[in-house]
Each structure stands twice: as structure tokens, then as C-alpha cells.
Amino acid sequence: MKTGLAAKLGKDEQAGKHPYIRPKDAATLLILDGKGKDTRVLMGRRHMRHTFMPGKFVFPGGRLDPSDSRISLAHGYHPVVEEKLADRLKGPRSEARVRAFALAAIRETFEEAGLFIGRKAEAEENLRLGKGFQEFIEHGVLPDLGPLRFIARAITPPNRSRRFDTRFLAVPASAIAASLPGGTGPSGELEDIAWLTLDEARAMEELPMITRRILQDLEERLAHDPELAPDSPVPFYYYRNGDFQREYL
């Protein structure tokens, strides 16, 4: 189903005349604190040194690393969330690849915001975490996918120098098991990190159009589905025939 806003997204976010580039898998995490109109989400400004969306306010996240599919877990996804994430995958479809979406978002959230999403490991548990998760071992935290909910999926339009097939995942702030002092992560990729109400977030001028759309989708969903039920429809945005399309998974 194509909508007027979806068409506007296509016009606003298409740029350049780059040859076709296959989108890379990516994931981002919306950490939610509070309920209803008081819900706040963690966002930060991308450093100006970035070539992709410099200076824009975004949720923590990034592209998948091959090692993200080889990480020990406290718990996997809710089965319905896993099923929806596996829907309409391009390329190989495997449990490890689907699991890597959340692990990439969790890893990037630590690197960019200094937050450990998961649960404290029991003394007898043997943490076997790989590249990108060394700090989790030192803090005794196991990534936990159980609380995560699938919010949206969006593919960057063609004619861009960089393209991503991004899964937007939400998790309650209660899933933060530990944090680094200073309110930021070791990568320095995000600046001005802050908890914003949904209205405050949408009012930011330096906001990508797709991020604004996801915030609107989230607010509408919370209004009738405050617990973010796993089986709720998930909007999927992609580019076809000159405009963004919106379907539901």
C-alpha cells in the first residue's frame, strides 16, 4: 500500500545518480523509557565526520558485522518477533542471520551510547562472546533478545552511495543491565545523546525523514498497543516505481 507520506519520503531521501548498490543489513535500537505521552527514547547526533547522514539525530545502531551471528545469548527472540524478522529476507535465510539483527543493534548501542542491553550473567555461566562484545564479558552481561520488539523495516532508496536494509527494534529501558560512565560510548560516533519525548524527537530539525516516520509509527502503535505485542503489524518501507511503498509484515 502506497501512502502520500511514503511518496514524500521517496522524493526527500533520494539523491544522486550512483549505480545500483545492494543494501547492507543494518539494525537500530529504540530504547523506551516511560509510558504513553511520557515515553522517552534515546537519540544522539551523528558526528560530522560521517559521510552518511552527518549531524543527523538518530537512534543508536549500524550495519551488521559477520561476528554478530556467533554470539552466546541469555535468551532468543520471542518466536513471533523472530518470524517477522525472517519475513521477506533477501539472500540466505538462517537463524544466525536473523539473530544478528538484534546483536548488531545491541553492539552498536554499547559502542555509541555506552549501554549494555541484556541481563547480568549467573556465576556459573560461561560467557563465550566474540568480537565487539569483549566489554560485555568484563561487565558480566549476556545479550538478551527476549524483550526486543520489531517496530519497522526500511530500505534506503536507490541512487545513494550507501544503502541499508534496516530493522528498527524497540526495547524497554529496564533491559539496560549496565552502562559506562559519562553517558556516551567508546566509538564517539554519537554526540549530544539525550532522552527525548516522542514529540521532542519529532521536533528536531536535524532528523532524517524516515526516522520521523518511524517515530510517528511508534506513537500510533503505542496509543493502541502500549505493551508492543509481538504479533502487531510491522510497517515495511521500500522503494519501487519512483516512490516509497509501505506494506506490513
Image: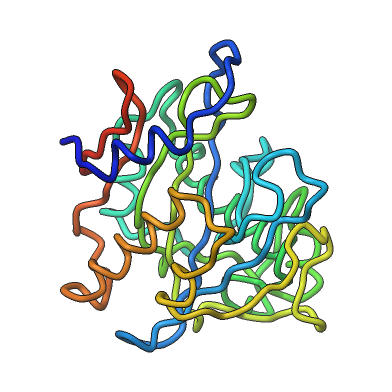
Q: In which quarter of the image is residue 224?
A: bottom left
Residue at (25% x, 61% y) in the render: 230
Quadrant assignment for the C terminus: top left
* Camera-nearest residue between 171 and 40: 40
Image position, residue 83 (x, y; %): 29, 45
* Relative side of 159 to 224, left or right: right
Residue extending furthest toward the top: 19
Residue at (53% x, 48% y) in the render: 27
Instruction: Give the image's coloring scheme.
Output: rainbow
* Relative side of 209 to 142, left or right: left
**Figure disc tally:** 0
Residue at (82% x, 58% y) in the render: 187
Image position, residue 143 (x, y; %): 58, 64
Quadrant assignment for the N terminus: top left
132, above or below 196, in the image: above
Q: Quadrant of residue 154?
A: top left
Image position, residue 11 (x, y; %): 40, 33
* Camera-nearest residue between 60 and 149: 60
* Camera-nearest residue between 18 and 172: 18
